[in-house]
Image (spheres, helix red, strand yellow):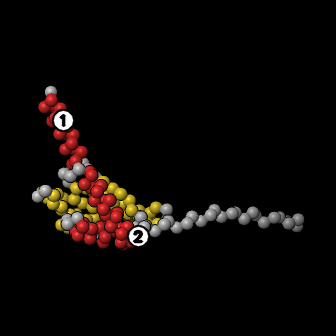
Amino acid sequence: MRRSLLLVIGFVAAAATAEARSEKAVGWDMRKVFPTAVRFLRIDERATIVEKDAEAGYVLFEITDEGKRFRGALELVRLEANGRETVRLVVTIEDRPEYVEVGMLDRLERKLRKEYGNPPAPPPKEPPTKKEPPPAKSATD
């Protein structure tokens, strides 16, 4: 019975690890986020960049941890929020737990903040316009 329980726990943990995918939205535009993300992966994370495409918004990479190589992908999705462009970052690293991906996203956001400061504030909302009342009819109409 105990062995069966350990096998079930092992399968569940393996499935959770294999299905990990983490995401975070950041308030800077794609022109700033993409090159910073590539530098971050290559220099800060010491990843090997396998393929990248700024137009399509992705970077494929490999990282080495404890002598093993793991494939990963960073997707950058352009969004419009509150009247300004933002970017959703989606990272997937095969066979690594979710906390590895979340940590990578947190470090990338810190790098963006260090390089560019706080994200720009959304533009102010325009007050609702008052409707002009229709012109009054004159007595000759």
* Mark positioned earlier in the residue sequence (2 or 1): 1
Which secondary structure, mark 1? helix
Q: Residue at x 41, y 70 (%)?
A: 117
Label 1 Cα neighbours within 10 Å, binned few <14 / some 14-19 / many ≥20 = few
Q: Determine contact: label 2, label 1, CB under 8 Å.
A: no
- Residue 76 in view: no
Q: Position of residue 34 (x, y in %)?
A: 32, 69
State the residue in front, 56 or 139: 56
Q: Residue at x 23, y 70 (%)?
A: 43
For this orientation, the residue located farthest to the top is 1
Judged left or right of residue 131, residue 109 is: left
Q: Tag 1: residue type? A: Val
Tag 2 residue: 117
> Image height check: is 27 above or below 92?
below
For this orientation, the residue located farthest to the right is 139
- Residue 3 in view: yes
Q: Tag 2: residue type? A: Gly
Q: Residue at x 31, y 64 (%)?
A: 108
Q: Position of residue 59 (x, y in %)?
A: 25, 65
Judged left or right of residue 30, residue 66 is: left
Tag 1 residue: 8
State the residue in front, 26 or 136: 26
Q: Position of residue 95 (x, y in %)?
A: 19, 51
Q: Position of residue 90 (x, y in %)?
A: 31, 58
Which secondary structure, mark 2? loop
> Image height check: is 39 above or below 6?
below
The residues tagged by marks 2 and 1 sit, at their Cα atoms, a distance apart of 47 Å
Quadrant in which the C terminus appears: bottom right
